[in-house]
Image (tube, coloured by chain):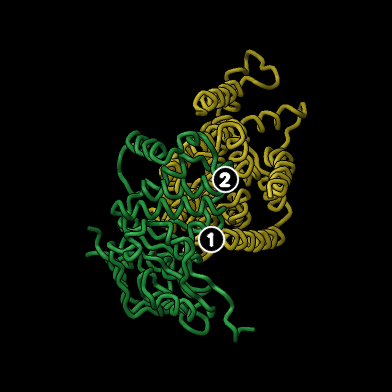
Amino acid sequence: MTAPLILKDIELAGRERPRLRVPELRFESSRMIALVGPNGSGKTSLLRAILGLERALSGTIRCGEQDLLTATTRARAEKVGWLPQHEPRGEGVSVFEFLRGACFRFDASRGEIDGRILEGLRGRELCHLVHAQLNQLSGGERQRLGLTALMLQGASWWLCDEPANHLDPKQQLLTYGALGAAWRGGQALVCVTHDVNLLWHAVPRDRWGEVRVVGMDRGEVVVDDSLLSSRLAEGLSEIYQLDVRLTSREETPVFTMNLAEESP
Amino acid sequence: MSGPRVLVVMLGCVAVVLAAPWVGAPMDDGARDFILTQLRIPRVCMGALVGAVLGVTGAAYQTIFHNPLATPSTVGTSAGATLGALSILVLSPGGEVVGLPLLVVAAFVGATLASLLAIGVAASGRASSEDIILAGIAVTLAASALALGLQFQADINTTFAAVRWSLGSLMVVGFDRVVVFVPLAVASVTLLLAQTRALGALASGAERAQTQGVHVVRVRTICLLGGALGVGAAVALCGPIAFVGLLVPHLVRRSVGGSQRVLLPSSVVVGAALLVVCDVLARTVWPGREIPVGVLTAALGAPALLFVLFRRRTAA
């Protein structure tokens, strides 16, 4: 079982108010965690804080015995890996070199690392890209490659930042399906999303209750509920300032979102 | 894979360097040995070493700053080295420091101080590669102004010598300067090549690399110091030679690919061959006269820079 991620007294300085203020937050690997909230609510800042990409940060972030804020970059890379919103277009960077970067934390021989990369590409049915350059790939291929890189890095937690934001509907479903499959296979993950409805497609029906939705607004956690909770729609209404209702279309639940009546 | 192509390019470059001493005006039998062993071979050795340092430094800088226009010139390294060396040339104290000519030490100190600003900006963590390049341009402008001020204060002969030096030339007699430069060039190239794996990860983005375990600030600092060491020494001994650091990585990327495992070592070899070829042209293109190699590289580099800018605009 992966050690939980525990954030305590996290505060990230901002211009007028803290960009992030989280007194206590605990992520357990037994739940698939979705971070939701409007633009600027602090979702990405929270991920970046855990990844060590934010400097003006106070508090503690622990994964097991490891304090991630004081850990070396290699030690942190063992605990948390990142799937950014946009994979680099990487002019002149080959697929192989991109994936070698994911193996940087390992002291294995060059041959061993190349073997792992080939195995990873085979596992994701991306072998045909082995000689390709990053800037030759489609958005969907780049995202699959990003998932392969995460897998090769082998971090305890995957932190995914709106991984399907710029993809077509089919690729969105495939991406969330792959993330859900990884979680079911024992991979701990936190996924920032703008589309709560994609979560229904990430895991099978019998595990919807294990998806935990953490809603953020103005840098603070204001919603923390299961995907199946009857209170979730109300919480989402509050953070998005929309009229959010849970309905059902041919047995697949859907959160419908409409502008609330009082909105201009 | 590009393996055979890399091999062909590398062998071609080595052949060019090996053949270079025999290219030029016919040699009398009596003076042949002197011309070869005291003039042409030391000169080719110097050109190959300086070209190798400039080539690999340009490749490393372009990767750490994610900018195809990053070179020792744009980050301020060359300008700092030039100011350091000019200070000694104009103020002429001469002498040695820890066995090295003061000129070399001053150029290295100048290059390091200029690079320190880029390092300082890079170490702030939130700086973009554009911020570092802008800081480098500011340092270059300030160092150039100070260098002009120094020349203005000097007498006419010193100013003339400084201007000649600032044109960049590989003209050496014997192996004295080569012997001074070899350990510095080897140390510089070794420091940069030792970062190949980290630079490979950095090529996909600094933040991405950091989350994969790369200590980005440390890698940038090592590359800037390694570059300052080699470029500082090269500038002190040969004067500033522009555009090699810019041109070589682009030539390598286009001919054998952009993977850092190929780019960095290939830039060493292609840089060496390119500067040797430019120097051969500089001493043969105008019979009886010699063009400073820095003038020739600048003449070739300026259209190359425009070509890179044009390609980036059309790609965008």
Q: Residue at x 62, y 54 (%)?
A: B74
Quick one: which residue is furthest to the front in this view? A250
Residue at 47%, 78% in the rendered image: A217
Residue at x-position 45% and y-position 61%: A252
Say which amino acid is labelled 1.
Ala
Percent position of residue B273, x then y: 59, 30
| Residue at mark 1: chain | B
Is residue A225 found left or right of A196 in the rendered image? left
Q: Nearer the viewer, residue A82 or A141?
A: A141
Mark 2 and 1 residues: CB-CB less than 8 Å, in contact?
Answer: no
Whether residue B180 is visible to the viewer of this picture, yes or no, is: no
Q: Spatial distance from mark 2 to mark 1, Cα to Cα? A: 35 Å
- Mark 2 element type: loop
Specify the colour of chain B.
Answer: yellow
Tag on residue B118? 1
Provide the letter of the chain coloured green.
A
Q: Position of residue B226 (x, y in %)?
A: 46, 49
- Looking at the figure, which quarter contains the N terminus of chain A? bottom left
Where residue A184 is drawn, which disc sits there? none
Instruction: Residue A32 in the image: state x and y as whole percent.
Output: 34, 62
Q: Where is mark 2, residue-wise? A: A138
Tag 1's secondary structure?
A: helix
Residue A185 in the figure: left or right of residue B294: left
Q: Chain of mark 2?
A: A
